Amino acid sequence: MLTGKDWWKKAVFYQIYPRSFMDSNGDGIGDLPGIIEKLDYLNDGTQGSLGIDAIWFSPFFKSPEYDFGYDVSDYCDIDPRFGTLEDFDRLVAEAHRRGIRVMLDLVVNHTSHEHPWFKESRSSRDNPKRDWYIWRDGVGPRRRPPNNWRNNFFGPAWTWDEATQQYYLHSFLPQQPDLNWFNPEVRKAIEGVIRFWLERGADGFRLDVAHIYCKDEQLRSNPPFYRRPKIEERMSPGDRSLMMNLYTIFGLPEFQVKRYNQHHPETHRVLKRFRQILDEYPEKTSIGEILSEDPQVVASYYGNGNDELHMNFYFDFTHCRWKAGAFRRCVERWERLLPPEAWPAYTLSNHDIMRAISRYGGGEDADARARLLAMMLLTLRGTPFIYYGEEIGMKEVRLSRRQLKDPVGKKWYPFYPGRDGCRTPMQWDSGPGAGFTTGEPWLPFGPELERRNVAAQEKDPASLLNFYRKLIWLRKEQPALLEGSYRSVVEGIPDDCYLYLRETEEQRLLVALNFSSRRRNISLPSQLKASRMLISTDPRRAAGELDGLSELGPYEGCLISLNP
Ligand code: TEU
Ligand code: CA
């Protein structure tokens, strides 16, 4: 097990979506006993396993599942679909025994509408828990919503409650009422939740939408999107009034600048308090889901680098074009913006977005591209997060309207198919239940099941799975990958290649990535002498001594040791 207060800086994380990892009882839904069965696959201490060091579990707490666990009705219990608290204890013990740390998903911007807190809160206007949520009167004779805020899925952020004749706020579904983070009792209650799991063996938390806990206390309406300074600057006065008219005539309220319902300064105070709590226990960590187009804003959630969140997801890869320069600029920007002691965290996919392998077309080149992305993810300066199934090249699954489960997809289909396509069950083998279930899986399996499954890829030394395994185990032995500096190399490098150095005093490594489908000549600056190939994405290129590096094959990525 990685130990020490900074263990998470050296770790490779793996995200499990519990509904879809392994079903132990044939109901078609993954569960905790199922996950325990598969821990050896993740890390059994040998190079025959994936070798990851920590798991982030999407929520498995009690939930009516309007948003599949992101609507929690009891923070301190396991949903019976997934198991029991005893199963959880066993999961922690079995994971720790294998050196795997356990990260839980803390979903506390909102609760489920079935949470006892909300049930009390909505029971009457003078209930002591009324103020735990955000309740407001309707405005004017027609009792319109208190402001124009929209929720993040579809429609208004306010729902009218007949019984007590007020609106309540929800940044997601009406079944996900927002907690009032200005109420000290709410803060206390969530502190209790955090301590409950830390004491039960959790090693830390992923913080769901941690950038929206606190909202404008005056509940001011958001400006329409054309009020964004950048867009507005570019508009002529005529266009501006046209926009204004369109906006009022057609009411395009979805298009607004979220000025007043996110990134409130008070949220930083809440998160700093979380950090203090985590710091009371040894070796705990956190990672924030902070959504902003502006990386500077995301960076601010690190505080001074040591007093707020340990890590924040950097999501720029999830919408980066397939261009070497685009990826390089993403990384350089993040490296530049982070406070000196802040530690980056990179990810390609998660349970909300299209799988990376399918994002770039998914055709014939998809597998070669997936290998290249894997090499980048696992060699950058920072902690990599792998999404379950990524290591076997599971693809985004196209679903018909009838197959959809995610409310977001059901609402927007066919314009946006929702998030089910990236949440399909893990493919363990090519049998009828894909080794995932003996029953009917809750979502169908993906295309090319014969190839994209664990059993088939274990047998093939050239498989994506075996590439991940080699790279992850190799990473553990390279000080420059674990704690070295990062520096791009651009001189003499073709535009469609991305090269960088990872260096410590004892070791110098070069990562060379060719994003093009053609062979590329490389002329390294004279002071960089490639001396040893550690691993290439191309299984035909052997590891071993090198006398320089002069070319990269199509989509080839190489990890190379340099002469000191
Ligand atoms: O997601 C936050 C979020 O706003 C988006 O990623 C959202 O899921 C996407 O825009 C949908 O179109 C987090 C969780 O990761 C997500 O699964 C939850 O549904 C959401 O919070 C609410 O808890
Ligand atoms: Ca099950």
Image (cartoon, grey):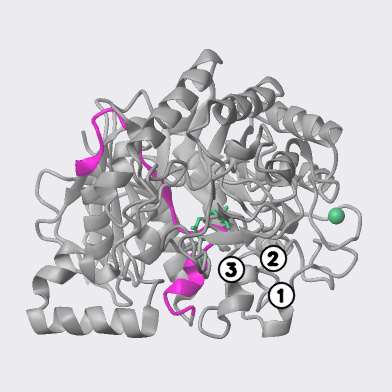
Closer to the camera in the image, 126 or 39: 126
Mark 3 crowdedness (10 Å alpha carbons): few <14, some 14-19, many ≥20:
many
Q: Position of residue 289 (x, y in %)?
A: 46, 46
Q: Which residue is mark 2?
A: 453
Q: Which mark is residue 450?
A: 1
Q: Is residue 342 magenta?
A: yes
Residues under labels 3 and 2: Cα distance? 21 Å
Q: Which residue is mark 3?
A: 419
The magenta segment? 336-362
Residue under the point 75% across and 40% down: 116
Within 8 Å: ligand 2 and the Cβ of disc 2? no
Residue type highlighted by circle 3? Arg
Residues under labels 1 and 2: Cα distance? 7 Å
On the image, which quarter does residue 297 sit in? top left
Residues under labels 3 and 1: Cα distance? 24 Å
Residue under the point 37% across and 40% down: 382
Residue depth check, mark 3 versus mark 1: number of the one nearer the observer: 3
Pick whichever of labels 3 and 1 is earlier in the sequence: 3
Quadrant of the drawing holding the N terminus = top right
Residue type highlighted by circle 1? Glu
Q: Position of residue 48 (x, y in %)?
A: 66, 45
On the image, which quarter does residue 322 sit in? bottom left
The answer to the question of whether label 1 and label 2 lie on touching residues, with beta carbons closer than 8 A, is yes
Q: Secondary structure at mark 1?
A: loop
Within 8 Å: ligand 1 and the Cβ of disc 3? yes
Q: Is residue 236 visible?
A: no
Pick whichever of labels 3 and 2 is earlier in the sequence: 3
Quadrant of the drawing holding the C terminus = top left
Residue under the point 59% across and 26% down: 185
Residue 95 located left or right of residue 101: right
